[in-house]
Image: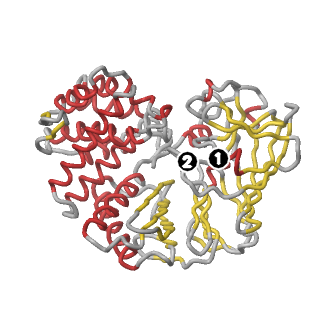
């Protein structure tokens, strides 16, 4: 998973009024029981409402109980808004909340539960600002600099509460801790052991099967080393890994991951009948490699689940597949098959409408599939020049365009245009326009990048050779 509108809201201050530029926000979060947490907001000067920077998924109305009878939480477009019922200004409010452990579409999981009942909480879910517009249409794509004012230097104070122990940025603490409430990060509340290695700091669920824990570390070590070699030193230093494990029935496997800063969060479910097989290890390797690739995707200019999500999600898939092939953890035929599968899935998504509107259709997987097609096309152009997708991304990350805190889609367009004149127009049309013949659009983009394609008797796209 990639960066979100929260970073845009926080870093791009919109001084809609003279008071807005002075906006201050403080949040205090405390676990009070196994199934209930308490959150308190203070804001100055008084505001008439607040909107949440991370609004994907309509879960707050069912999981937040606002203290008192004066406040209401309501859906506004693709976010949540809190206001007084009488619309009068306020400076504080509080709520009791039930931890939500399901991943909202296109966003980070609010709470990750470990098998012993301990939890990791994502602080970014509490980032809020003041709306400058008030209709659902204004917030159809969530919160950003164009419709909300961000607070200056917001903070969140974490209380150990009834749990008594936290792991904050890899440090074990037992007292109240204040953090900047910028893009957000995960904080672990519980008593699991913390592992320190030269490669990473990790809190891993004790219930994780030994073979999977070992494979996890082996895979991460290999992919971190390769990505670091190809893309440069990891921003933010040594990563912090949080891995929760859930035992499932039968042969089911579920995997949810997210990257925020230098943190890698994995919520993994494995059925009791899932064996330690090459296929199981291959699936896990691809999943961890995709999430690891996001660690190098610095900057907050591409909102998660926003129109440009293809840039991060598709490239993360493509870099994971290419890296595993280079490390000989996947055979070349498997890599070609993954890209071919993505191309055909992309056709189905484009048949429903433009890629840039996939999030509005709740088709977030379109960003992965069609993004992988764009990444493969970029890889093809680079291979024709004796380089590859990693060289492209290293140049993109080092371009300095927009500063180290931003990496926007238009920078991608700019770089492919420098690579081959006019290809930026090809990619932009692919992502933003409707396509009467989606298969022709996918084949056309790949052909323009020199990637040999064909069509099977059943009408599926064939990629005849990797570039």
**Residue furthest front as drawn:** 250
Looking at the image, residue 49 sits to the left or right of residue 328; the answer is right
Q: Position of residue 372 (x, y in %)?
A: 30, 42
The residue closer to the viewer here, 451 or 244, is 244
Q: Which mark is residue 59?
A: 1
Q: Residues within 10 Å of mark 2 (few under 14, many from 20)?
A: some
Looking at the image, residue 206 sits to the left or right of residue 53; the answer is left
Looking at the image, residue 175 sits to the left or right of residue 3; the answer is right
Residue depicted at x 40% and y 63%? 252
From this view, report whether residue 298 is shown above or below residue 226.
above
From this view, report whether residue 22 is shown above or below residue 162.
above
Residue depicted at x 24% and y 41%? 376
Mark 1 element type: loop
The residue closer to the viewer here, 348 or 34, is 348
Return the residue at label 2: 104
Residue 453 visible somewhere in the drawing: no
Q: Position of residue 235 (x, y in %)?
A: 44, 55
Mark 2 element type: loop
The image quadrant of residue 331 is: bottom left
Q: Position of residue 111 (x, y in %)?
A: 61, 59
Residue depicted at x 56% and y 39%? 5
What whole-number distance in Å separates the C-alpha atoms at marks 2 and 1?
8 Å
The image quadrant of residue 73 is: top right
Q: Position of residue 236 (x, y in %)?
A: 48, 58
Q: Earlier in the sequence, mark 2 or mark 1?
A: 1
């Amino acid at each position: 998973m990639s960066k979100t509108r929260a970073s845009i809201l926080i870093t791009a201050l919109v001084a809609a009024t003279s008071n807005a530029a002075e906006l201050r926000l403080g949040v205090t979060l405390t676990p009070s029981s196994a199934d209930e947490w308490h959150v308190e907001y203070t804001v100055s000067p008084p505001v008439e409402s607040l909107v949440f920077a991370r609004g994907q998924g309509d879960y707050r109305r069912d999981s937040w109980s606002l203290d008192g009878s004066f406040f209401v939480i309501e859906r506004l477009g693709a976010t949540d808004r809190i206001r007084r019922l009488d619309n009068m200004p306020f400076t504080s409010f509080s709520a009791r909340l039930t931890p939500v452990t399901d991943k909202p579409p296109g966003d980070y999981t609010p709470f990750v539960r470990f098998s012993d009942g301990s939890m990791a909480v994502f602080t970014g879910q509490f980032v809020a600002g003041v709306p400058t517009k008030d209709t659902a249409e204004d917030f159809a794509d969530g919160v950003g600099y164009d419709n909300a004012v961000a607070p200056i230097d917001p903070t969140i104070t974490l209380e150990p509460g009834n749990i008594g122990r936290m792991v904050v940025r890899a440090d074990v603490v037992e007292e109240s801790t204040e953090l900047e409430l910028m893009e957000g990060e995960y904080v672990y509340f519980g008593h699991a052991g913390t592992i320190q290695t030269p490669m990473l700091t990790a809190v891993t669920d004790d219930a994780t099967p030994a073979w999977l824990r070992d494979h996890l570390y082996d895979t991460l070590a290999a992919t971190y080393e390769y990505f670091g070699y190809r893309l440069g030193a990891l921003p933010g230093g040594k990563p912090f890994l949080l891995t929760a494990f859930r035992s499932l029935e039968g042969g089911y496997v579920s995997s949810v991951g997210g990257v925020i800063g230098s943190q890698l969060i994995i919520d993994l479910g494995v059925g009791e009948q899932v064996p330690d097989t090459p296929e199981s290890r291959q699936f896990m390797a691809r999943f961890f490699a995709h999430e690891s690739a996001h660690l190098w995707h610095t900057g907050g200019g591409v909102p998660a689940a926003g129109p440009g999500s293809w840039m991060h999600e598709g490239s993360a898939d493509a870099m994971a597949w290419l890296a595993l092939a280079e490390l000989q953890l996947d055979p070349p035929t498997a890599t070609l098959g993954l890209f071919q599968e993505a191309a055909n899935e992309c056709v189905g998504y484009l048949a429903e409408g433009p890629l840039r509107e996939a999030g509005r259709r709740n088709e977030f997987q379109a960003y992965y599939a069609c993004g992988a097609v764009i990444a493969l096309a970029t890889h093809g152009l680079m291979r024709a020049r004796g380089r590859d997708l990693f060289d492209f991304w290293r140049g993109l990350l080092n371009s300095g365009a927009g500063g180290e805190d931003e990496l926007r889609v238009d920078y991608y367009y700019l770089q492919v245009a420098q690579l081959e004149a006019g290809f930026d127009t090809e990619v932009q049309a692919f992502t933003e326009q409707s396509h009467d013949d989606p298969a022709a659009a996918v084949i056309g983009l790949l052909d323009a990048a020199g990637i040999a394609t064909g069509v099977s008797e059943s009408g599926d796209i064939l990629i005849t050779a990797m570039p």
